[in-house]
Amino acid sequence: MLYSNIHYIPCVFTCTPVKSVTVERAKSTLKLVKNEWKNKMRHCNMGTRKNDDDESVGRQAWANTMCTKNSGKCTLPPLPRDRWIPPGALVRRCGISYASSNSYCTQPRTQRRGGISFDRGDQSAVYVRMLGDMKMRSRQDYKSERRRTSLPDIDLKLLDRLSQRETKLKFGSRFLSLHKRRRRPRPTMKLAAECIALLDAHYNGQAQCMLAHAGEWSFNIFTFDTLTNGRPLLHLAMHLFHEYDLIQKFHLDVIKLMTTFTLIEDGYHDSNPYHNAVHAADVTQAMHCYLQEEKLRKTVTPFEVMVSLIAAMAHDIDHPGVNQGFLIATANHLAALYDNSSVLENHHWRSAVGILTETKVFAHLGRDLIQSIEDQLQSFILATDITKQQDFLNRFKKCIDSDVFDYVNNEKHRHFLLQIALKCADISNPCRVWDISKRWSERVCEEFFRQGDYERILHVPVTPLCDRYSTSVAKIQAGFLDFVVGPLFSVWLDFVQSRKAQGILDNIQINKSRWKEIIHKDDKQNESEEDSDDTDLEVSSDIFATANEDSHGDIDSTELSDTVEESRLPLTFGSYEEEEELIRNAGSRRGSGRSLPPVHEVAENFTFLNERRHSLPHLCLRRDIMNVTIHRDTFLRTRFNRRSSLPTAMIQQATSLDKLTGRFSMFSTDYIVKSKKSFSMEELMTRPKVSNLSPCYEASRLASGYFTFTEPGYFSSRTGRRKSGGSSHSGSKISLNSNPQSVNCLDIENCDPDNESEGCEKLVGTDCQREANIGAKQTLLAFQQNQNCLNKLLNHNSSRNTRKDHLDKTSHTSFNCNSSKQTDVHLSDEGKGLQPSGLENKLTNSRNINLDVGFPPHSKDIVLNLPKNTAQTTGLS
Ligand SMILES: Nc1ncnc2c1ncn2[C@@H]1O[C@@H]2COP(=O)(O)O[C@H]2[C@H]1O
């Protein structure tokens, strides 16, 4: 398409392409646009130019500037109709002209950047082109421009990222959260489209009915969630504000109030099984129940009611579905931001305050009251930190026994009481009637187990409570009721002395005994399964024996037992310590691998069985394979060195995790094929998250990157740099260049090359953020735990020089080599002969090595030489 420069108009207004219009229409459109532009130009030049002389002077100056700017060469001389616009006017209107665009660009422009174009070729279309926008300018001069502002460097970096389109799309999350929220499909959405009136009347009627019983402990929040079409918090909150007459008392704007509640509700992640908006609504309803207790109802002020209700609503806002320990272990920016203390709770209250500020719902109440609301919100939400449970309980016990505790007259004492009430509400789900409580228990445990899965994959220690293979919902619940819920609610009952509280305590007893029954049943079942496994094993042997006798009769008993054993434990696969652990975990749920189903649990993909056991009748093999659990083929064939007989629970989990992540997981077929891709916490979580935008994003990626298997021949996902070298060399060659991305992220100081045990543990920040250091430190520590080879390598005699010369500098590089055979591997700096034999030893035992060594950017490349045969086995060439 030829864009002529006729009718060039150097300003930006919203113009849209006009497609395939007739010539007449095109011309008239052009005329219209021209006129409109003329008017606008006249208008915008008004007041900035006194007369035509001014214009000509300005134009001349502008033309001169252009020429000089482009080193005396005028690439695009101004045309007669080009207008001179004072730069001030352009900036005000976010406009950019030929002149201004050039003035902002360092490179001379060879084409006009916009205007109205007329395609003379086909005479059929008029294009109104948008002129260049402000982005180009912001790319070029962003820093220098912004630097004039008072924004600190971190914010500038953040803004820089945000200004990039890709980042914008990926991380456009509102609450700086780990996940982006995705609203559930509303239960009634489909129906609503069909018969909206009927549905409204029906559901609203029922929802209203339920709200009339909002103060009862048997309130079913799940039903209410359905009836309110997935908006339980908004409806409940509005109802309660009406019921307590808070709207009237505080002259609240209903629209602002609704906006506030909607934002709070939207701030919860529906992808969390437990920490979602339904949980928030549940806690709010429980809080309402406690506020109805006589001792509180008669004493608390409307202001306290209002703040405590908002606290209940927002107490878990933007919860990522993982706990504080996880955030710390994965060097999340929130952990660094809040000094690893009440990380989530701090984030919750700040998010809540952010919403209130944004909606200005309390703006009319004055500064003092707003400040008071914010302070109280903070202290309420921080009190929900479960790690402070014992402190609060002890204080509460003391208060009840003490005469000094005057909650009627003392505002602070009342505040403490409300904190306890909120804490009770937060963990009240196991105190509901069995059906509701069970549902919550399953949800909360599912969330724990998901975290455990993430931890397993990220190779951080699995939190015992989150390990789905070593604990169960029933066990978690029994423990939680015994040690956390029971003690708190019995003290609560002591204080409120009400029938409702007594009912709650009764529920606790009932639920506890039911969970204990389930534990008992499970144990019995497991015992009987273990017995039946033994029997199965014998039966399987019998089947094989009979089948073989029937068909060939040439298989001896040794071979038979081999068959059984081999099919349970395929030995042909590589030995990954990590996967071994996974298998161990998988088997440990029922105590031992013996409880796992026998022969027929071999994956159907394991065709070696078919190939090897010639002596087995075809039919017999077929029958075997038909019994295979269908999902088995999604497991890592090459990564399980022992057996494929994983419990069904794990297989199911694999699929659900797959769905959960929506990307590759280690259980997916994709992963088997491509395999060995680095992945981090960010990638495992359901959504893109703004943690990616945080200053220590690199650090957290760094943290996770080291535990991963990088693609053979690639250094790491961070560097994105391919292996170098080739077959012309005596062996494969991997260059370890310094990684510029790592510069300033990690600084290892005081690496004493003569002290082998000390290693490089002391991390001191230089130019980098403190958060980055935290992440980096965790990286290194975890790395050292997981990969002993680092120390072996670093402490080796022959590598001392390397350390001395290079490692105590700034930048870091990780690389990966992969070998299944014993290999001759040398680490050298381009022939200088630094050969750590520790690496050799490690390669004997391991298929995969990650090494982390630091090199200053200016150091010579370090070369890892792999003999040719190694290269072949590792896929390096
Ligand atoms: N039914 C439950 N079983 C086990 N833990 C629970 C249960 N309900 C709540 N919790 C825990 O109690 C914690 C209270 O604070 P959080 O909401 O941050 O996280 C909650 C869970 O970790």
Image (cartoon, rainbow, N blue to C red):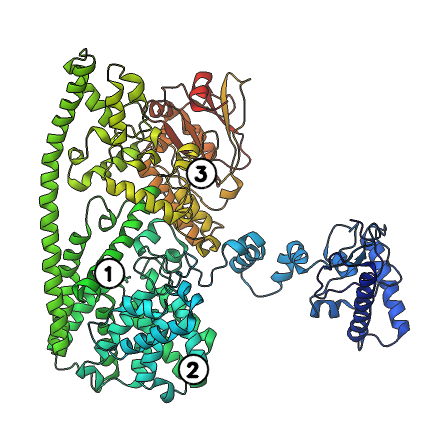
Judged left or right of residue 473, residue 575 is right
In the rendered view, would you say 78 is above or below 717?
A: below
Alpha carbon separation for disc pair 2 and 3: 62 Å
Percent across and percent down for residue 435 are 19, 62
- In this rendering, the answer to whether 798 lies above or below 434 is above
Relative to 632, is 726 on the left or the right? right
Looking at the rendered structure, the secondary structure element under dot 3 is loop
Q: Relative to residue 859, is residue 640 drawn left or right?
A: left
Give coordinates of residue 262: x percent, y percent: 41, 71
Q: CA distance from mark 2 to mark 1?
A: 32 Å
Q: Quadrant of residue 629?
A: top left
Front disc: 3 or 1: 1
Q: Is residue 229 above or below residue 455?
A: below
**For the residue carrying disc 2, how many other residues have a C-alpha within 10 Å: few (<14), some (14-19), or many (20+)?**
few
Q: Residues within 10 Å of mark 3 (few under 14, many from 20)?
A: many
The residue that appears at 10% across and 45% down in the rendered structure is 523
Q: Amino acid at mark 2?
A: Val
Identify the mark at residue 254; answer none if there is no mark. Answer: 2
Q: Which residue is mark 1?
A: 440
Badge 2 vs badge 1, beta-carbon distance below 8 Å = no
Q: Residue at x 32, y 42 (%)?
A: 654
Task: Check mark 3 vs ligand 1: CB closer than 8 Å? yes or no.
Answer: no
Task: For ligand 1, tell me if the residue under mark 1 lies within 8 Å.
Answer: yes
Q: Residue 242 vs residue 569: left or right?
A: right
At which x and y percent is residue 437? 20, 63
Which quarter of the picture shows residue 759? top left
Spatial distance from mark 3 to mark 1, Cα to Cα? 52 Å
| SS state under label 1 | helix
Residue type for callout 1: Trp
